């Protein structure tokens, strides 16, 4: 059996790249690969010190080479894309040069102001295939002379309903409380102040899932302490329960490479307030109807008189265009074109 490997900074955790990587791992296994995971952090099959975010000494080249020596196809998740560990990116790129590899790009450096000066990433070799998660990034890669395939993130559209009553009981939220869910990590571009302001405006309790990262802890503590609405700050393991418990989902980010929560809200039939970041506009072209942070009167009107037709339409669009079946089909097509399908 052909062996495949997923390589990244960290895997098996709750961050967005880990979640997408897990889905790709499952699909590649279904296609016929014996899959292993390789990372610097997380519950992985092959843990390589130096691959992780901030492990700036980088991995031992021989150790990484040995970790992928028996692998026929390597999928690199963002490690050779965003400069969170340049020595690791260089080692991985050198090791994989001339070998079959899919570089799955989520966050190229020019899309982050603090990394805009980095020009050596994304890594590129003629033996590789590059996959991006939106058309905007594909166009930006093309401007840099790199051909890509767009494969949008996919979701399990057959997931069961969550348990609203049990989740609200666990959170200590009364049945009659309007619960505003913000299922994100706490970092500046997630626009926590705008999310809190929405919860305040509609008279809801604000529920933030993720912990502070990128030095945002002190700012987050201040924002939550000053909020003029009830605040809940805790993660939840089961995604369906998040949406079952919520009455409104907020996602006022200033930038995202994709943005899973608006599509997840569509799958689980919840209204969503979405910021005007560029890829949100690209996704909206599929026909989603999301609410704008600048039009909270429309949000309030929906909450006062929910429109089942809007939720029906959003759910149908998500199932048609963002299913795991669609991702698998796109991935099979890429593998067939490259001659890499087992």
Image (spheres, rainbow, N blue to C red):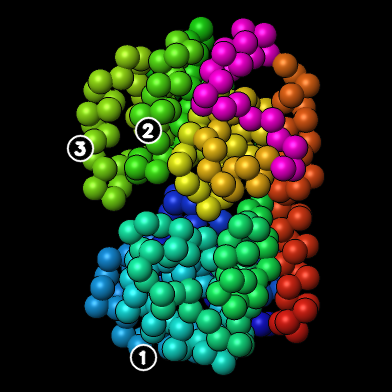
* Image: 4 above or below 253: below
Residue 62 got which mark? 1
Spatial separation of the CA atoms under disc 3 and disc 2? 13 Å
Q: What is the number of callouts on the image?
A: 3
The N terminus: image quadrant: bottom right
Relative to 244, 177 lies left or right: left
Taking the image as drawn, is residue 316 in sight? yes
Residue 192 got which mark? 2
Relative to 341, 172 lies left or right: left
Q: Which residue is mark 3?
A: 218
Cβ atoms under marks 3 and 1 closer than 8 Å: no
Q: For numbered disc 3, what is the local secondary structure? A: helix
Q: Counting residues from the N terminus, which is met first, the one under dot 2 or under dot 1?
A: 1
Relative to 43, 240 lies left or right: right
Q: Counting residues from the N terminus, which is met first, the one under dot 3 or under dot 2?
A: 2
Q: For numbered disc 2, what is the local secondary structure? A: helix
Q: Position of residue 178 (x, y in %)?
A: 50, 13
The C terminus: image quadrant: bottom right
Residue shown at 67% from the left, 33% from the top? 266
- The magenta span reads 285-306
Residue 271 got which mark? none
């Amino acid at each position: 059996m052909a062996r495949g490997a997923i390589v990244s900074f960290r895997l098996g955790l709750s961050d967005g790249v880990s979640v997408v990587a897990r889905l790709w791992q499952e699909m590649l296994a279904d296609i016929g690969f014996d899959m292993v995971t390789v990372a610097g952090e997380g519950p992985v099959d092959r843990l390589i010190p130096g691959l992780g975010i901030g492990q700036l000494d980088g991995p031992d080249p021989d150790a990484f080479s040995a970790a992928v020596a028996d692998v026929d196809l390597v999928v690199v998740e963002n490690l050779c894309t965003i400069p969170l560990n340049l020595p690791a990116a260089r080692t991985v790129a050198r090791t994989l040069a001339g070998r079959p590899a899919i570089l799955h790009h989520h966050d190229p450096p020019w899309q982050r102001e603090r990394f805009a000066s980095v020009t050596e990433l994304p890594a590129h070799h003629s033996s590789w295939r590059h996959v991006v998660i939106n058309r905007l990034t594909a166009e930006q890669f093309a401007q840099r002379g790199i051909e890509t395939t767009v494969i949008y993130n996919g979701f399990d559209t057959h997931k069961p309903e969550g348990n609203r009553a049990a989740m609200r009981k666990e959170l200590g939220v009364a049945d009659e409380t309007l619960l505003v869910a913000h299922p994100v990590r706490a970092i500046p571009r997630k626009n926590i102040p705008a999310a809190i302001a929405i919860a305040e405006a509609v008279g809801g309790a604000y529920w933030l899932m993720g912990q502070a990262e990128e030095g945002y802890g002190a700012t987050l503590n201040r924002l939550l302490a000053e909020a003029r609405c009830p605040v809940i700050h805790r993660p939840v393991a089961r995604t369906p329960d998040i949406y079952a418990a919520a009455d409104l989902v907020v996602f006022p980010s200033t930038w995202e490479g994709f943005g899973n929560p608006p599509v997840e809200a569509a799958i689980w039939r919840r209204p969503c307030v979405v910021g005007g970041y560029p890829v949100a506009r690209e996704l909206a072209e599929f026909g989603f109807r999301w609410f704008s942070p600048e039009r909270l009167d429309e949000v309030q009107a929906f909450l006062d008189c929910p429109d089942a037709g809007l939720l029906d339409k959003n759910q149908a669009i998500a199932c048609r265009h963002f299913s795991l079946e669609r991702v698998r089909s796109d991935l099979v097509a890429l593998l067939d074109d490259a001659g890499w399908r087992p």
